[in-house]
Image: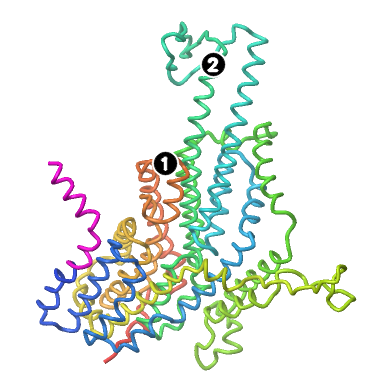
Amino acid sequence: MARQISYLNWFWYHRNYFIIFLTPLLLLALPLHFRISLEARCGFAIALMAVYWCTECMPLAVTALLPVVLFPMMGIMEAGDVSIEYLKDSNMLFIGGLLVAIAVEHWNLHKRIALRVLLLVGVRPALLMMGFMIVSAFLSMWISNTATSAMMLPIAHAVLQQLRDTEIQADERDLQASAQDNPGFELEMRETKPQMTDENKPDMELVDGVYVLQCSPEVQQNARRRATEAKYELLTKGMSLSVCYSASIGGTATLTGTTPNLILKGQMDEIFPFNGGVINFASWFGFAFPNMLLMLVFSWIWLQFMFLGFNLKKSFGCGMKSDRDKEAYAVMKEEYNKLGSMKFAEVAVLIIFILLVLLWFTREPGFIDGWATVLFNKGGSFVSDGTVAIFISMFFFVIPSQLPRFSGDYGVDKKGKLLKAPPALLNWEVVHERMPWNIILLLGGGFALAAGSEASGLSRWLGDRLAPLQTIPPFAISMLLSFLVATFTECSSNTATTTLFLPILASMATAIKIHPLYVMLPCTIAASLAFMLPVATPPNAIAFSFGNLRVIDMVKAGFMLNIIGILSINLGINTWGYTMFGMDTFPAWANSTSSKP
């Protein structure tokens, strides 16, 4: 038995090598069965990448490079055509957005914003949870969900620790004062009969449903301490989950907030090249931001119910702040004071960030001609969101991080030393260290798969096979597919999930003559609803390590949030999204794809 277990362990530890070498052999039946047609060859490549991505037997970015090798060798696409797919406009938008995020993180602007909002919200449990969720969602709209969670969770735990310690100390002071005033002090427990050790177990009498205990101050103190610690352990779990969940939810609100959003834009431009820029920063924000607010409100209500209950007076608090509230508030105030006054670099980064957002919104708002249409895009789509992102992000490398100091002695200080020029807001060493280059390859791999599916005819083949779905109501198709993607993304990265599903969904939408965004948009956002498992997303993993959580805690909270998210997305796509994108008609551009002979 021991030898069998050791063999199984050996196989388990070496499983990645078995997957890498055995999967291609097992999948060879696919092209052989279909007489090695182009569609079968492309299907073989996609199935192989799907297995590698789901099992992560190789780094995701390395798997994303397989089309560079497989498509030319299988005669699907020429090597030059495949390579071009790895650096498209969506990649430029991703790089520009990340440069802004890196600058914000580098100068701690995100921490200043977070603490300032939390100081405004207050420290009462429900308000504190609401404050952390609002801040986490807002920050993750612009910087990575992982960075948001990694910054917010230590702040949340420091505040909760101070609240716990302050409440324990306050209880001890109250108990000592009561014991001095009334030696026969009685402790009332209304809910359950308290558990005591035999040697300390007092006589108890039930009076009108209330257990009246005659016990020593030490026993009362221990009972209160245990109750306080249990309360804050539950609150810590709720706060940890609220931060990681709201970071994932907030990332859905902007086009650059999380990678699946950019994958949708890239796939739309690749599969439907004449779509007229239907997905841009402004149109995405117009649909996804209200949806994010809706998900955030219902998520807060659910987490409030699970971890704080619905005692609104206790949770929100009324009247003057207690001493324990003031002491916890002082912790956040101290953290904020450590940042000092706002530096020139922070002001410069904030101005550049606001300028970028304004240019994104006004480039092509939809209801009027934007500045790009008036100045540059009269004869075509020359200036895109990616152009704006790269242009604005260049300012970080040319604007100094300090105001230049001038001297009457031609750049010499009082000690006679030459004054050096201040460094720029960003340098390439910082960017190189923090830029997730692997995501750029992942994006490119997805675009290459979409291009290969079109070139080989696999998209048309899938569309023909999915044509019978035309008998099912569109809203039911959208709902079912959203559930499928949300379930799949729990055990696979959201990037891999959207990369695999979106080309298939585009083929299906074309075959059954419904607006492609009607199914692609909900499924893209559903790919970010990975709430049930610690391994589903990096924010979940960070919260799991911080919050003393069990897997069952995350499953119970996350399952309902998945339901809330899917219902919210489909509500949006059938109401304001239906009007925004003209979902009632099958667009003419959906008949034109990027197929190549």
Which residues are drawn in magenta?
A: 1-22
Q: Based on the displayed image, in which of its 4 quarters is residue 528 positioned?
A: bottom left
Give how far across and how far down residue 24 sits, in percent.
18, 71
Dominant secondary structure of the residues highlighted in magenta in the image:
helix
Are circles 1 and 2 on residues that touch, CB within 8 Å?
Answer: no
Instruction: Look at label 1 and name its amino acid.
Output: Leu
Residue at 21% in and 72% down: 466
Query: Which residue is label 1 attached to?
Result: 549
Give how far across and how far down residue 89 sits, in percent.
47, 81
Give how far across and how far down residue 426 sits, in percent.
62, 71
Give the side of residue 526 with respect to residue 127, left or right: left
Q: Based on the displayed image, in which of its 4 quarters is residue 373 positioned?
A: bottom right
Secondary structure under the numbered disc 1 in the rendered image: loop
Residue at 66% in and 41% down: 331
Q: Residues within 10 Å of mark 2 (few under 14, many from 20)?
A: some
Give the side of residue 543 with respect to residue 180, left or right: left
Q: Spot the residue most to the bottom.
A: 379
Give how far across and how far down residue 467 sits, in percent.
21, 74
Query: Which residue is label 2 attached to?
Result: 220
Residue at 53% in and 28% down: 228
Q: Spot the residue most to the right.
A: 408
Q: Quadrant of the N terminus?
A: top left
**Residue in the foreground of this view, choosing between 289 and 355:** 355
In the image, residue 445 lies in the stretch drawn in magenta: no
Give the side of residue 459 with respect to residue 86, left or right: left
- First in sequence, mark 1 or 2: give its number: 2
Secondary structure under the numbered disc 2 in the rendered image: helix
Which mark, by number, is residue 3? Answer: none
Q: Residues within 10 Å of mark 1 (few under 14, many from 20)?
A: some
State whether residue 147 is above or below residue 66. Answer: above
